[in-house]
Image (cartoon, grey):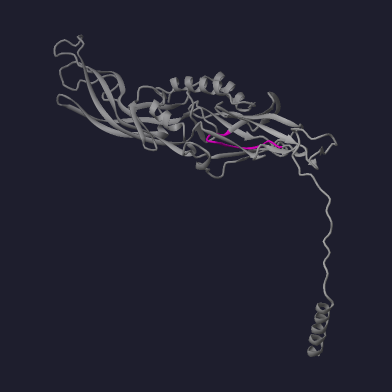
Amino acid sequence: MKPIFPLLSLILLSGMAFAQYSSPPLSLLIGNNTAAAAALDGYYNSSYAQNGTANLSIGNFSRLVNLSASVVIVGLSPNIGNISCVSEDIAVVIARGYYESHLLDPYGEDFDHDQCTEIEGQTIARYNNLNITFSFRNTSETVPFDSTFLSLPPSILDALESSSGTENLTINVTGIITFIFQIDNPPQGDCDEHNYTNISGILPISVNQTFLVGGNQKLVFLVRPILREQWFRDNRFDTIVLSQCPLYRAEIRMNGASMKNISIRTFNLTTDEFGFMRMTSNLSDAGGNGWMEDPSAVATPTPLEMENNSFAYAYMFNFSYQGLGDNNLSIAATDSVLDSEEYNDTLRSRMLSYNGLTMENGQPVNGNSRPSASSSEGSLTRLEIGLGLVGLVLILAFLNFWVAR
């Protein structure tokens, strides 16, 4: 097994695993995984190995050799917990390596009985018959497996941009690995002369993995005041944000000034046996901070958007403020791969008015007050009931009482 990192690197990575980050450490994660992928070219892991045999022959000599290779789809980078959100840096990291038994004895053999010893030289495994297929919804694209760090094809990236956050990207590696054995078979009568011959065996490979993916679409809409007008004693700016990728922060601004910064999650880094780094996140305390995350159900608010997008993450942000008249309120929501969406609206706060003349504070009405109708004096209308009608009612009541006895 090929070692990936020296001891010093492992010590440094162990220290990072205990560090907490207030913002997504994307550059650190991507840089690590790019370097780790380079070290995974030639990394054989017997736990993931696919095995086979090949009967190799030179002339009348033949021998059965064991072939073994491990191809592991390690992960999508970057990731947040169990989800990878689409970004220009998203890539798949794959580990590949091989192991084979020797065709000849390490000291050589005279397999053709010509008094010259045949020597086995280097053994090479070639991956040029392997392909990677990416499949998402109705989009599929196949590319050669030519690197252990592979960016996603453009057509797949385009499709992933609208992934709800509950959909899977499937990655398949299929094809054959060719094992080439180089044999030095000197010509008869001149054992000092080199005569190299290559013989090969093939090993079929098939590996697949699915990854939960999220897009970069967000939808923000105003919940309160729904009519953009409200009583100044209860000013609200309450919004709902739907997102396909987990949010990590939000900022509320009023008339261009920052009023509230909301931290939704913090991040940690972990490193697995392949040296592949993953982000984990912890939700910040939402209690009393005016926000709530609900990742439990998928929302598809078709009446509220131009496209038929679905969203796995729903957020409620509540904010109250002081002020009278028109104020511009905005919210900027940023997800865990630093993609942002901003919403702003102008809300009017008014006082109540009385008699169409004065406001709550006793001042004359103006544009900051709700209109009211003026009042006028009136008189009560007299209602006269004749004695005969009253008498009839009393007689009926008495008869009803007497019959009941």
Q: Is residue 300 visible?
A: no
Residue 73: percent from the left, percent from the top?
A: 42, 31
Query: In the depicted view, which residue is nearer to us: 184 or 140?
Result: 140
Name which residue lies at 84% across and 77% down. 387
Query: In the depicted view, which residue is nearer to us: 127 or 200?
Result: 127
Quarter containing the N terminus: top left
Quarter containing the C terminus: bottom right
Instruction: Examine the image and state in which quarter residue 351 appears.
Output: top right
Relative horizontal placement of residue 187, taking residue 346 as reference (left or right):
left
Name which residue lies at 62% across and 26% down. 23
Q: Is residue 15 magenta?
A: no
Instruction: Examine the image and state in which quarter residue 146 appears.
Output: top left
Name which residue lies at 64% across and 26% down. 22
Which region of the structure is painted magenta? 236-246
Relative horizontal placement of residue 266, taking residue 379 as reference (left or right):
left
Residue 175: percent from the left, percent from the top?
A: 30, 31
Query: In the depicted view, which residue is nearer to us: 279 or 359?
Result: 359
Q: Is residue 119 above or below residue 286?
A: above
Residue 238: percent from the left, percent from the top?
A: 67, 38
Relative horizontal placement of residue 45, taking residue 243 as reference (left or right):
left
